[in-house]
Amino acid sequence: MKTVSMSGSRRENVGKKDAKKMRNAGLIPSVIYGGKEQHHVAISVKDFKELVFSPEIAFVKIDVEGTEYNAILQDIQFHAVTDNIMHADFLELVEGKQIVMGVPVKTTGTSPGILAGGKLQTKLRKLKVKALPADIPETITLDISKLNIGNSIKVKEVEVEKANLLDAPNAVVVAVKVTRAAVSASMGVDEGEEGGAEGEAATEEATEE
């Protein structure tokens, strides 16, 4: 897993006026917590680009006036109108202490259901993983090569070594859904043909099922 380096300075004041001044100066009010002490810091907005605007998850190394803190981005707040970053929370990594991170889901293999005209739907793009920092995977890869139309993979069917998944066990992660093209193919009707009232009713009924 990649590590993003950031630099910060300690905040003397933590009020709203001070926070507004920092944002105007291109700094983001931030908090590092989870360790022995809580640290209020200001970090350049430029340092957030690689961390926030990337699909990859990452550990963060924050240099605060010569002291380094290993952490993960736990929460970030954006302005409702401008989408500018307003505040960030970092969870300090402590040796022997588990953390929770959202890990991206990827798929591999060729689904027979998709070949038959079905469509792959990703219901959960990330899964909540609880593990020691060293055991957090970069991605969770699911094999869809056995999924026919109507089949799915649920959270309880996903295994991540040395980690626990916190999402609801019966929640669907990925599924292959029926499409109009698949229904037409199963009925031996070209998708562009006019099937008449009875044909349309049959197609709609099959689609609903």
Image (tube, grey):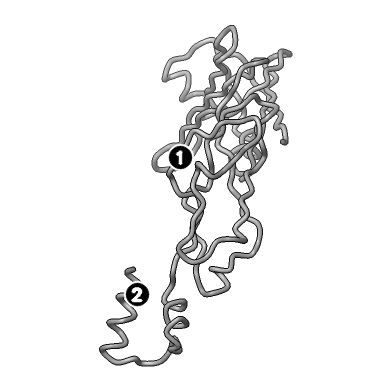
Badge 1 amino acid: Pro
Q: Is residue 52 left or right of residue 18?
A: right
**Could you say where residue 13 lies in the image, as x and y percent from the top left?**
49, 11
- The residue lying toward the viewer, choosing from 117 and 170, is 170
- The residue lying toward the viewer, choosing from 128 and 48, is 128
**Could you say where residue 151 lies in the image, as x and y percent from the top left?**
48, 59
Residue ID at (57%, 8%) = 37
**Residue 43: quarter of image:** top right
- The residue lying toward the viewer, choosing from 23 and 158, is 158
**Mark 2 and mark 1: span between their CA atoms?**
29 Å
**Could you say where residue 48 lies in the image, as x and y percent from the top left?**
61, 35
Check the picture and name the quadrant holding the N terminus: top right
Q: Which one is earlier in the sequence, the residue at label 2 or at label 1?
A: 1
Badge 2 amino acid: Ala
Residue occupied by mark 1: 169
Q: Which mark is residue 206?
A: 2
Residue ID at (40%, 43%) = 81
Q: Secondary structure at mark 1?
A: loop
